[in-house]
Image (cartoon, helix red, strand yellow):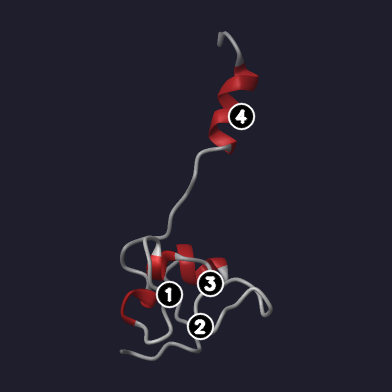
Amino acid sequence: MRENPGEERLQDDLSPVFPSDKIVCKDCAFRKSGIIGYKNAYCKVYTSEIGAKPNGILFDNKKCEYYQKE
């Protein structure tokens, strides 16, 4: 029996998940520069006005219709 199952569940819910190093954005001409860079949810195509990149691109290695190899 767990001491505090609620605390364990809270820790699971708050664990960050980051995109893979192999996402298509890695060598895209539209990728964002900086510390997070191509793993960022935003780039020159996906902006805060348009909305973030779909989760499929970030986490499931799906193709991006705007991808342009640099």
- Tag 4 near tag 3, CB within 8 Å: no
Q: Mark 1: which amino acid? A: Lys
- Which label is found at residue 42? 3
- Cα separation between marks 2 and 3: 7 Å
Helix, strand or loop under label 2: loop
- Which label is found at residue 44? 2
66 sits to left or right of 52: left
Q: Mark 4: which amino acid? A: Leu
- Tag 1 near tag 2, CB within 8 Å: yes
**Earlier sequence position, callout 4 versus callout 3:** 4
Residue under pointer 1 = 32
Residue 65 at x, y percent in the picture:
50, 88
- Cα separation between marks 4 and 2: 34 Å
Residue 45 at x, y percent in the picture:
54, 84
Quadrant containing the C terminus is: bottom left
**Earlier sequence position, callout 1 versus callout 3:** 1
Which residue is depicted at the point 39% across and 70% down?
38
- Tag 1 near tag 3, CB within 8 Å: yes
56 sits to left or right of 29: right
**Earlier sequence position, callout 1 versus callout 4:** 4
Quadrant assignment, res 3: top right
Quadrant assignment, res 53: bottom right
Residue 11 at x, y percent in the picture:
55, 29
- Cα separation between marks 1 and 4: 31 Å
